[in-house]
């Protein structure tokens, strides 16, 4: 039964990622409030997966969420620094790197309030790490 829930939450989370990434490529969206809500909803399946994994005492999904959150935060940092460093390069370089940024942290660009997405990724990272420690895992 729990494997079905894990699979459902992961598929939902993947679909939300694709949706947020696609919407992140819209240059000047009109529905900013709706996109911010959607970007925040992106994190609900991850949080639910953390809660389910902790309740079932299964460290696997918690490790996955910790790795995804760390990867997204680290990738976002690298992509942002590269975007700033390429300011004097041809425009296409900046566009490609901005596309990479959208893919690395899709809810951040989609939601347009970057600090909210970074905060939610950090919460997933710290929450999953804390729950793993409570389970006696590293």
Image: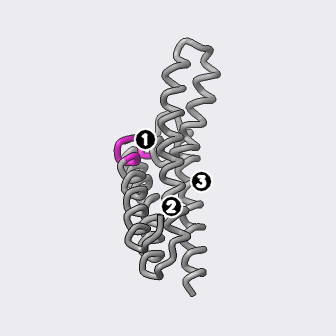
The part of the chain drawn in magenta is 111-118
Residue 106: say if magenta: no
**Furthest-bottom residue in this view:** 1
Image-based side of 127 in relation to 65, left or right: left
Nearer the observer, disc 2 or disc 3? 2
Would you name the residue on which mark 3 appears? 18
Query: Residue 3 location, x and y as percent?
Result: 59, 80
The residue lying toward the viewer, choosing from 131 and 2, is 131
Query: Residue 58 location, x and y as percent?
Result: 51, 77
Residue occupying the point 58% across, 23% down: 94
Which of the 4 image quarters holds residue 101? top right
Question: Secondary structure under badge 1?
Answer: loop
Which of the 4 image quarters holds residue 126? bottom left
Real-space CA distance between mark 1 and mark 3, rounded to the nearest whole angstrom = 20 Å
Q: Which numbered disc flags the more N-terminal residue, 2 or 1?
A: 1
Q: Is residue 18 above or below residue 2?
A: above
Indicate which disc residue 65 carries. 2
Residue 117: say if magenta: yes
**Furthest-top residue in this view:** 88
Nearer the observer, disc 1 or disc 3? 3
Question: Secondary structure under badge 2?
Answer: helix
Q: Which numbered disc flags the more N-terminal residue, 1 or 3?
A: 3
**CB-based contact (under 8 Å), mark 2 and mark 3:** no
Residue occupying the point 53% across, 40% down: 75
Q: Which numbered disc flags the more N-terminal residue, 2 or 3?
A: 3
Image-based side of 126 in relation to 53, left or right: left
Would you name the residue on which mark 1 appears? 30
Q: Main secondary structure of the magenta part?
A: helix
How busy is the neighbourhood of tag 1: few (under 14 within 10 Å), some, or many (20 plus)?
Answer: few
Residue occupying the point 42% across, 74% down: 135
Query: Residue 1 location, x and y as percent?
Result: 57, 87
């Amino acid at each position: 039964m729990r494997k079905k829930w894990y699979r459902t939450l992961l598929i939902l989370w993947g679909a939300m990622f694709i949706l947020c990434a696609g919407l992140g490529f819209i240059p000047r969206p009109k529905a900013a409030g709706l996109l911010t809500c959607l970007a925040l909803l992106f994190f609900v399946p991850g949080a639910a997966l953390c809660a389910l994994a902790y309740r079932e005492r299964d460290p696997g999904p918690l490790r996955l969420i910790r790795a995804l959150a760390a990867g997204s935060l680290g990738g976002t940092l690298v992509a942002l620094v590269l975007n700033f460093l390429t300011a004097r390069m041809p425009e296409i370089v900046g566009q490609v790197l901005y596309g990479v940024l959208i893919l690395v942290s899709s809810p951040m660009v989609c939601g347009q309030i970057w600090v909210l997405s970074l905060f939610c990724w950090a919460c997933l990272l710290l929450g999953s790490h804390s729950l793993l420690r409570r389970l006696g895992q590293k």
